[in-house]
Amino acid sequence: MSAAAPSLQPLIDSLLAGDRRALSRAITRIEEGRHDVIAVMEQLWERRQGAAVLGVTGPPGAGKSTFVDRLVVRLRDQQHRVAVLAVDPSSPFSGGAILGDRIRMQRHAADPEVFIRSLGTRGHHGGLTRTTLESAVLCAAAGFDRVVIETVGVGQTELEIVGVADQVVVLLVPESGDVIQTMKAGLLEGADVFGVNKADRPGVDELVRELRAMAAMGRGAAGGEVPVFPVSATEGRGLDPLLNELTSRLDSGARPLRGLNPRGLVARIVGEERARLGRGRALDALGAGGALEDLGRQLEEARVNPYGVVRALLEHWQS
């Protein structure tokens, strides 16, 4: 096991002691793709076993944040330390998260046993961010034994959460019935539990029947029939059976038949690291004292086509 750089050790030590500010700084380093991230994650990876991870996903407007807020209350009542990673669309200007789930969950802000962090997608597809898995590992390392990941609103092919969470609840609303036919395969493969939210609206009974029919015909992510619960997260109606099911699964250590693809994870990280190193090499080559410094000056002065510079760099590296 590689040790992290000495300058990072105090941060890691503080994180392992449960310091929420250290956790926040560590997640920021992960999001920024700092060069020392690999050594940090290598040191902390095994800590992921200390937490059960629950994914909350579904289409936009399904009431995921309201549901997560209620879930946090239940988990805290059970004396769990809870981390919430809320994935939000990114601002096209700053790259930061723009919906601010931390604002929606203000009643938990003063609780030292709750950590809430919004993660911007930064152009990443699949309902998560590029670094959601690593952020969950850091939360586990900081002593949060329940990590709740709320995905950005997703469609039928954007169920990346299934490779990260131990259990996944898919929240739908009665209006989802219009698109359920095109979502069947992905939903059934990705869901451990279904919640039909906003159950006071017309069409809820039909959607519940259709989901239960789907569950009866196939097997869900955990290999068994997927339970379906009609609920109203805003009013709290019907939530107890669903929350009981989820917390029971997390307490029992239930794991799905699917799971993390370790080869895919390594391939993704290697690709990102090579891309980072490539950017660094390019900047060095075009910078002061670099082999192509003159070409870099022409580029800054708009006297050369950027794609011509790309070709020159590739030819230079291949020679």
Image (cartoon, grey):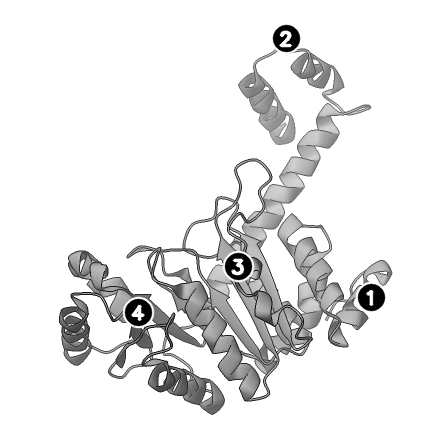
At a point 64% along the width and 43% down the height, the residue shown is 276
Q: Are marks 2 and 3 in contact (CB under 8 Å)?
A: no
Identify residue type, mark 4.
Asn
**Mark 3 surroundings: few (<14), some (14-19) or many (≥20) residues within 10 A:** many
- Write down the residue under mark 3: 101
Position of residue 227 in the picture relative to residue 265 (left or right): left
**Mark 4 surroundings: few (<14), some (14-19) or many (≥20) residues within 10 A:** many
Residue 135 is situated, as x and y percent measured from the top left of the image, at: 60, 64
Q: Secondary structure at mark 1?
A: helix
- Write down the residue under mark 1: 9
Q: CA distance from mark 4 to mark 2?
A: 58 Å
Identify residue type, mark 1.
Gln
Residue 317 seen in the current view? yes
Comes first in the chain, label 4 or label 2: 4
Residue 7 is situated, as x and y percent measured from the top left of the image, at: 86, 59
36 to 199, vertically: above or below: above
